[in-house]
Image (cartoon, grey):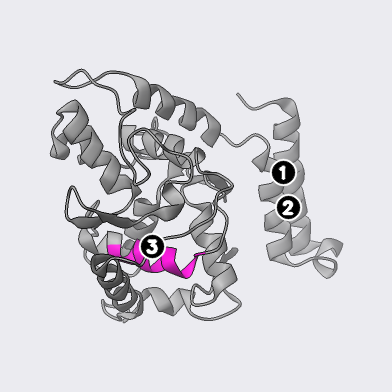
Amino acid sequence: MRSVKHLAASAAAASLLTMGAFGPVAAQKSTEQGIQEYRDMLADGNPAELVELLGEDLWTKPRGPKNASLEQCDLGKGPGKLEGAVGQMPRFFSDTGKVMDVESRIVHCIVTLQGRDAKEVTAKPFSGAGQRPTEMESLVAYVYAQSRGTTIAVPQSHPEEIASRARGEKIFFFRGGPYDFSCASCHAADDQRIRLQGLPNLTKTEPAQAAFAAWPAYRVSQGAVRTMQWRMYDCFRQQRFPELQYGSQAAIDLITFLGVRANGGTMQATSIKR
């Protein structure tokens, strides 16, 4: 439960945003600065911490037909080694022969270590409004928390990694759908926004680093932790593209492209967003 201090901070931040729109504060700070103050005030009591704890319990608890935990899951740095792992993903895994992102790799570990069915695991990866976090949201939040503060270094040493990034770049700039949109329509120019939400120019290094480093994130407006796969899914939805399947090659390729663009940044997830 959030403390009185955090509730007061939220109220104060909301007041600042309102004044910024209708009063003297507008002359002193931009809307984006006001939003950032709101995020900063909430960050000390990020509800994602509770989801991370749920994820830790799921990670260490024996489950499935094999009655095993996920503690020996290999995210690229060896079985059971989590620190810094997600900052180096997506990456090629020799045991599967393909490039995998964090979420598809966790699903792989659930299947191989615990003996569970992939379709059952991914049947509902995202929670609805007001619902408890899903198993995947909880596990992802926990795993990402172990790499907070580490450097982003998405590899490009294997031919499959290079190919994944190239496909992701094509997806980023591909225009289609009823609005003739692409990812680049919103994220390839400076100073663009949708309503109060600034849109980072992901073709530039610093905005790309900040954006990639912040996911997964707790969305205050939805009361839920949202993962990187969800972020790709929702961008496709807003473009009115066909539904992006969870863990699909297209989703992984797009994340690979964005990750390579963000290399050199510092992981901050699980962060907090509006």
Q: Secondary structure at mark 1?
A: helix
- Asked whether residue 124 appears in the rendered view, the answer is no
* Magenta span: 253-263
Our reading of the magenta stretch's main secondary structure is helix
Amino acid type for the residue under numbered disc 2: Glu
Which residue is denoted by mark 3 in the rendering? Answer: 155
Q: CA distance from mark 1 to mark 2?
A: 6 Å
Amino acid type for the residue under numbered disc 1: Met
Residue 41, labelled with which disc?
1
Q: Residue at x 37, y 34 (%)?
A: 139
Return the x and y of residue 96 as percentages of the image width and height.
17, 50
Q: Is residue 110 magenta?
A: no
Q: Is residue 261 magenta?
A: yes
Q: Is residue 116 above or below residue 151?
A: above
Find residue 168 and report its image quarter: bottom left
Amino acid type for the residue under numbered disc 3: Pro
Q: Is residue 131 above or below residue 21?
A: above
Q: Is residue 245 left or right of residue 206?
A: left
Q: Nearer the viewer, mark 1 or mark 3?
A: 3
Q: Is residue 257 above or below residue 76?
A: below
Q: Badge 3 local density, few (<14 within 10 Å), some, or many (20+)? A: some
Q: Badge 1 local density, few (<14 within 10 Å), some, or many (20+)? A: many
Question: Circles 1 and 3: CB distance less than 8 Å?
Answer: no
Question: Circles 1 and 2: CB distance less than 8 Å?
Answer: yes
Q: CA distance from mark 2 to mark 3?
A: 34 Å
Q: Which tag, 1 or 3, sits closer to the chain's start? A: 1
Q: Secondary structure at mark 2?
A: helix
Q: Which tag, 2 or 3, sits closer to the chain's start? A: 2
Return the x and y of residue 37 as percentages of the image width and height.
73, 52
Which residue is denoted by mark 2 in the rendering? Answer: 37
